[in-house]
Image: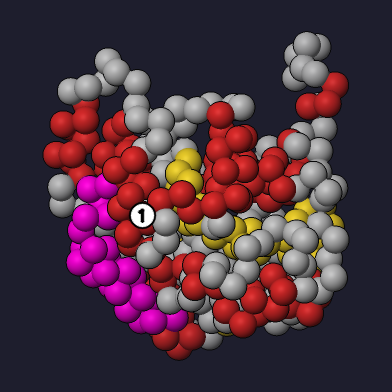
C-alpha cells in the first residue's frame, strides 16, 4: 500500500480469484469455466469485428442487445450488457444499494467486496443449517436484496415462488437475482418480471456460453431499472463492452443448439460425478449449477484440495466459517470427471 492510497480505500478487502495456472497439463476444475470451446461461428465473428478495431464499439450494443431481447422474450430496452456480470452486478450495487444491501453469509464472495468498495452497509443473513436460503428471512427487509440463484458455492437453487416471495415482501427495494448458473437446471426469474418491477436478473456468458475470457454479462429488468444501470455506466465507462466481445456474444446466441448441447452434457456429467462421489462416501449438496459442493469423508476441504493438487487436479476450497469441510468441484468434460474420480479413489486407497 502506498502512502498515496486514499483514506477511504485503505480498508478494502479485494476478491481472491481461484488459481489460474500457466502450466498446461492440469485438470482445471476450480473456476467454473466451460470445458467446451466457444460456439461455432464465434471465432469468425471476432475476426471480422477485428477489421474495425480502429473505430469505437457500438455504445448501444444494438445487435447483441436485440438478440438477447429475442432470446429472453423481453423488450430491447429491458436489456443491459456489461463487461462480465461482475461489472453489471457492481453497477447494480452502486445504483440500488445506497440504503444498504442484504445477502446470505455463504454466497458469491464479490458481494462483500462491492459493499466495501461502495461503502454500503451489508446485512448478512445466515443460510439455514442445510445451506438453504429461507425466503422468510428476507421479509420486510429495508434494503436492496442480492440472491445468487443457484447459490454459489453451494449450487443449491430456490424455486421461483421463493424469489417471488422475497420480491413481494420488499416492494420498495430492488431484488438482484444473480443467475450466473441458472442454465444448468434452475428457473430464471425473467418469468417474474411482468409481475415484479423490482426484480433485476443478472446473467453471464462465462459459465454456460463458453465465453469467460470475452467478459460479457447482462441484466434484464424493467425499462426503468435498465435506465438506472445506464446512468451508472455513462457516468463510469460508456464503452464498456468492446466490439470483439459484442461480436462473440452475438455469434454465440445464434447457436442455440450448441448452447443446449453443452449445458445438457454438463448436467449429465454432474449427475454422474455426484453418484460416483457418493459411492465413495462423499456428502454432495444438490446442485443446479456447473459445479458440485462436496464434503470428503474424514478429510477437510483444504486437505482434499491439496491432495488433488498433487495429482494435477485443481478444485476450489474456501477458507471461511461453516464450509471448511467442503470443496467446490467444477463440472468439466467426462474425461476430466473420470480423472477426478480416479484420483479421488487413489487418495482413499
Ligand atoms: C462467475 C460468477 C459471476 C461473474 O461472472 P462474470 O465472469 O463476471 O460474468 C457472478 N456471480 C456469480 C455467482 C458467479 O459465480
Compared to 216, does 341 lie above or below?
below
Nearest the eye: 326 or 213: 213
Residue 253 counted in the magenta span:
yes
Magenta-highlighted stretch: main secondary structure? helix
Q: Which residue is mark 1?
A: 68
Q: Nearer the viewer, residue 226 or 304?
A: 226
Instruction: State which quadrant residue 23 falls in.
Output: top left
The answer to whether one can see residue 177 in this image is: yes
Q: Which residues are magenta?
A: 249-274
Instruction: Answer few, some or many: residues within 10 Å of disc 1's Cα (few below 14, many 20 plus, some between 14 and 19).
Output: many
Residue 2 picture location, percent across and down: 75, 14
205 with respect to 172 (left or right): left
- Left-right relation of 341 to 129: left
The picture places residue 61, in percent across and down from the top left corner, at 36, 38
| Quarter that holds the C terminus | bottom left
Q: Quadrant of the N terminus?
A: top right
Q: Secondary structure at mark 1?
A: helix
Depth check: give the residue in front, 288 or 77. 77
Q: Residue 295 appears at what percent x and percent y?
A: 60, 75
Above or below 37: residue 349 = below
**Residue occupying image coordinates x 44% and y 81%:** 274
Instruction: Report the front residue among 60 and 213.
Output: 60
- Residue at 27% from the left image edge and 47% from the top image edge: 250
Amino acid at each position: 500500500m502506498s502512502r498515496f492510497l486514499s483514506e477511504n480505500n485503505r480498508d478494502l478487502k479485494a476478491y481472491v480469484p481461484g488459481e489460474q495456472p500457466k502450466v498446461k497439463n492440469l485438470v482445471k476444475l476450480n473456476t467454473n469455466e466451460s470445458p467446451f470451446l466457444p460456439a461455432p461461428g464465434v471465432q469468425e465473428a471476432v475476426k471480422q469485428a477485428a477489421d474495425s478495431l480502429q473505430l469505437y464499439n457500438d455504445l448501444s450494443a444494438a445487435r447483441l442487445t436485440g438478440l438477447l431481447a429475442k432470446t429472453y422474450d423481453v423488450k430491447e430496452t429491458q436489456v443491459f450488457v456489461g463487461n462480465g456480470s461482475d461489472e453489471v452486478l457492481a453497477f447494480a450495487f452502486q445504483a440500488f444499494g445506497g440504503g444498504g444491501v442484504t445477502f446470505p453469509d455463504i454466497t458469491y464472495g464479490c458481494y462483500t467486496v462491492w459493499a466495501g468498495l461502495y461503502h454500503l452497509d451489508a446485512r448478512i443473513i445466515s443460510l439455514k443449517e442445510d445451506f438453504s436460503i429461507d425466503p422468510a428471512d428476507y421479509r420486510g427487509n429495508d434494503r436492496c436484496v442480492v440472491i445468487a440463484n443457484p447459490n454459489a458455492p453451494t449450487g443449491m437453487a430456490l424455486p421461483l415462488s421463493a424469489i417471488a416471495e422475497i420480491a413481494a415482501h420488499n416492494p420498495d427495494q430492488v431484488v438482484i437475482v444473480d443467475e450466473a448458473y441458472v442454465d444448468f437446471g434452475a428457473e430464471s426469474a425473467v418469468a417474474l418480471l411482468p409481475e415484479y418491477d423490482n426484480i433485476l436478473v443478472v446473467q453471464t456468458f462465462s459459465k454456460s456460453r463458453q465465453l469467460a475470457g470475452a467478459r460479457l454479462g447482462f441484466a434484464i429488468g424493467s425499462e426503468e431499472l435498465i435506465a438506472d444501470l445506464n446512468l451508472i455506466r455513462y457516468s463510469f465507462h460508456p464503452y464498456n463492452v468492446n466490439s470483439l466481445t459484442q461480436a462473440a456474444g452475438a455469434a454465440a446466441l445464434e447457436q442455440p443448439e450448441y448452447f443446449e448441447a453443452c449445458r445438457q452434457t454438463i448436467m449429465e456429467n454432474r449427475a454422474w460425478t455426484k453418484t460416483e462421489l457418493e459411492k465413495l462416501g462423499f456428502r454432495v449438496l444438490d446442485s443446479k449449477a456447473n459445479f458440485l459442493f462436496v464434503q470428503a469423508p474424514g478429510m477437510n476441504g483444504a486437505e482434499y484440495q491439496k491432495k488433488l493438487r498433487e495429482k494435477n487436479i485443481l478444485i476450489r476450497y474456501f477458507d471461511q466459517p461453516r464450509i471448511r469441510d467442503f470443496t467446490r468441484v467444477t463440472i468439466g468434460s467426462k474425461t476430466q470427471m473420470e480423472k477426478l474420480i480416479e484420483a479421488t479413489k487413489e487418495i482413499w486407497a
